[in-house]
Image (cartoon, rainbow, N blue to C red):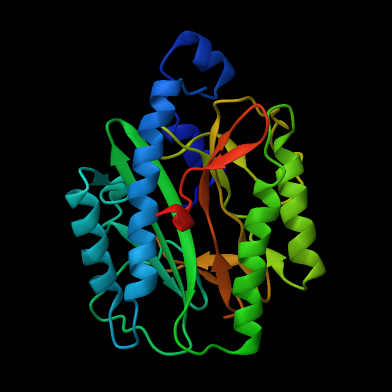
Amino acid sequence: MNILSNLLAQTTQPTSPKKQRRGIEIKSPREIDIMRQSAKIVATVLKEISELVQPGMTTADLDAHAEKRIREMGATPSFKGYHGFPASICSSINNEVVHGIPSSKKVIRTGDVLKVDTGAYYQGFHGDSCITIAVGEVTPDAAKLIRVAEEALYKGIEQVKAGVYLLDIAGAIEDHVKVNGFTVVEEFTGHGVGRNLHEEPSVFNFRTREMPNVKLRAGMTLAIEPILNAGSKHTRTLADRWTAVTVDNALSAQFEHTVLVTETGYEILTDRTKI
């Protein structure tokens, strides 16, 4: 799930004076172990959904599966009830950028570009991840958008290591997106994740001077999540007050992982390939 910078400030709740001054939590080895479990639950659910999706299903079907499985694995859905969000996943199709609300009336069709974002809260810590699924055979342009979005995520992750800066991640993502002819959505960012679903710092997907260029430290846990549009970078929010769509009806794609910063690099906590 993505977050605007002002919402991030509202939801970040540091737990000690030292952490409050810094604004960014450094997780202990015990906390990291718990986050590995919450992230594994998220990765498991997304892998199952990617294998489950078929034309004719509804996004409500996927939401029901996600909530059932999250609870079966001993966690609770991070998204359900969060600032009033009514579901356990965000399901955004085609020109829907983020925060799509699952519905029994929203039927998934061949050729759709389907984004599924979910989180799990386990023993006090959240995991958060998103995938984009090509439903059946999609157009070549849609397939390229999905491919580049996933590549952009890993271009950003590859920069992660203690001592590097957040804008190193942002620059790697932005450069890969632009060279492939797409745009980066700027209204939404990645974020820290841990005790709260959204914590400091904001993790931008483009170079900016709007926020401090934070130096990464081992023990930080970040949700890195580039969002790409095939057309304009701008979005608008529908009357449901959640679903953001492209202003020009162009396709959008997103990938996200929860990532641990280590002294020598990174660990992808929501890695679906290890499930």
Name the residue rendered at 39%, 88% in the picture. Answer: 109
Q: Quadrant of the C terminus?
A: bottom left
Give the image quarter of residue 211: top right
Do we see residue 146 in this rendering?
Answer: yes
Q: Position of residue 271 (x, y in %)?
A: 48, 51
Q: Position of residue 205 (x, y in %)?
A: 67, 51
**Left or right of residue 76, residue 272 in this image:** right
Name the residue rendered at 34%, 87% in the picture. Answer: 55
Q: Position of residue 96 (x, y in %)?
A: 48, 72
Front-most of 108 and 5?
A: 108
Which residue occupies the extreme front position in the image?
Answer: 274
| Position of 231 relative to 16 (above/below) | below
Q: Position of residue 165 (x, y in %)?
A: 73, 34
**Left or right of residue 212, residue 41 in this image:** left
Front-most of 51 and 224?
A: 51
Count of marks placed on residues: 0
| Position of 145 relative to 117 (above/below) | below
Give the image quarter of residue 180: bottom right
Name the residue rendered at 76%, 39% in the picture. Answer: 209
Front-most of 177 and 34?
A: 34
Do we see residue 240 in this rendering?
Answer: no
Give the image quarter of residue 33: top left
| Position of 213 relative to 256 (above/below) | above
Front-most of 69 and 255?
A: 69
**Left or right of residue 110, residue 188 in this image:** right
Name the residue rendered at 25%, 72% in the picture. Answer: 60
| Position of 118 relative to 47 (above/below) | above
